[in-house]
Amino acid sequence: MVGVNSFELSDGTLVLDAHTETTFDGVREAQRQLAEIRITGYDTVHVAGLVEGTDVADQLDTLGIMSVRLNVHHLIVVGENARRMHQTAEQEGSWGGESIPVFGVEHAYDELEALRGPRVAILITGGVDADMGDLVTRLKEERS
């Protein structure tokens, strides 16, 4: 089981911190945990970066497909090297704007501003070329 720590922001947003998960299996398991929270009535957001591994292209495809199939409401893909996850998610579903590619962690934070609120759960998984810990730290500064 993946270690996901959680905390709540002052606006009621639930943050699921799995920023140290950079393997395909770890990110996929964290996605499943997010899907379980969605079932309880939360809107869901997954912020993801590039995974490590040997079949990275196939793994990014699978993660993009799983985002759609698990009905994640928004996918924010951080970094040009992870963009394939965004492209696959858009091809898999009838998504229009639910998958958002961004260049860096700062841009991911900016996108989250519009998505936050009560009954919103944000999952942050790691990226091998983007320090998602910076995003988690910035959000922790806004805890209740």
Image (cartoon, rainbow, N blue to C red):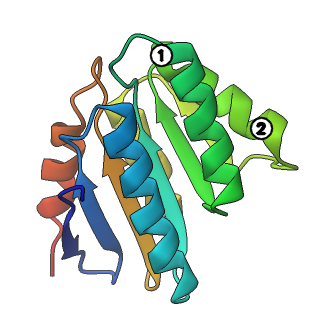
Q: Disc 2 marks which amino acid?
A: Glu
Front position in the image: 71 or 55: 55
Q: Position of residue 76 (x, y in %)?
A: 52, 42
When asked about the image quadrant of residue 73, the answer is: bottom right
Please say whether residue 80 is visible from this viewpoint: no
Q: Position of residue 18 (x, y in %)?
A: 24, 51
Please say whether residue 17 is visible from this viewpoint: yes
Callout in the foreground (2, 1): 1
When asked about the image quadrant of residue 108, the answer is: top left
Front position in the image: 23 or 110: 23
- Say which residue label 1 marks: 56
When asked about the image quadrant of residue 7, the answer is: bottom left
Query: Going 35% across and 16% down the picture, which residue do you hit?
Result: 53
Front position in the image: 142 or 3: 3
Q: The residue tagged with tag 2: helix, strand or loop?
A: helix
Residue neighbourhood size for the residue with mark 1, other residues' Cα within 10 Å, grouped as few (<14), some (14–19), many (≥20): some
Q: Residue furthest bottom?
A: 40
Front position in the image: 86 or 108: 86
Circle number at residue 25: none
- Say which residue label 2 marks: 90
Mark closest to the chain's N terminus, 2 or 1: 1
| Left or right, residue 92 beside residue 101 | right
| Left or right, residue 5 beside residue 117 | left
User: What is the spatial separation of the Cα atoms under label 2 and label 1, in whole angstroms?
Assistant: 18 Å
Q: The residue tagged with tag 1: helix, strand or loop?
A: helix
Query: Going 55% across and 88% down the picture, which residue do you hit?
Result: 41
Q: Disc 1 marks which amino acid?
A: Val
Query: Going 58% across and 31% down the picture, which residue do you hit?
Result: 101
